Image: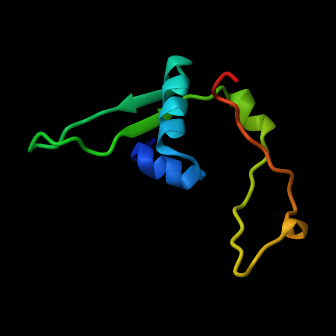
Amino acid sequence: MVEIGVRNLAAELGGSKNTAQRAVVALTEARLLTADHARADDGTFRTTRYLLHLPTDVLDSVPPRRPTRRTGPTNSSDITAEPTQLSLLGT
């Protein structure tokens, strides 16, 4: 379970707010994500809580990857892993 807004999710993933929203909708429609939209006592919306539902065999097939922080300018020769992208939306 994670509490995050769509704008913050987009920023974390390096995408736009609209793309993040479409991805959340696609995952929800595929029943892979459950969103809990709750309100605070004063009636304002709280940050949405998301629960991701993944089959266990999916988790076994993806090796964990540690995020790396770069401290200086980077170029293409600094890249050590192949870039990957999860396609959630039809092309």
- Position of 47 with respect to 23 (left or right) is left
- Place residue 72 in its image quadrant: bottom right
Please determine whether, in this image, residue 34 is positioned above or below residue 74: above
In the orientation shown, which residue stands out farthest toward the right? 77
Residue shown at 54% from the left, 24% from the top: 26
Residue 32: x percent and y percent? 55, 25
- How many dots with numbers? 0
- Place residue 46 in its image quadrant: top left
Q: Nearer the viewer, residue 62 or 89?
A: 89
Please determine whether, in this image, residue 33 is positioned above or below residue 73: above
Residue shown at 31% from the left, 45% from the top: 47
Residue shown at 52% from the left, 39% from the top: 20
Residue 65: x percent and y percent? 75, 55
- Position of 3 with respect to 76 (left or right) is left
- Position of 27 with respect to 36 (left or right) is right
Q: Quadrant of the C terminus?
A: top right
Residue 70: x percent and y percent? 71, 75
Q: Nearer the viewer, residue 22 or 53?
A: 22
Q: Nearer the viewer, residue 40 or 21?
A: 21
Q: Could you tell me if residue 44 is visible in this image? A: yes
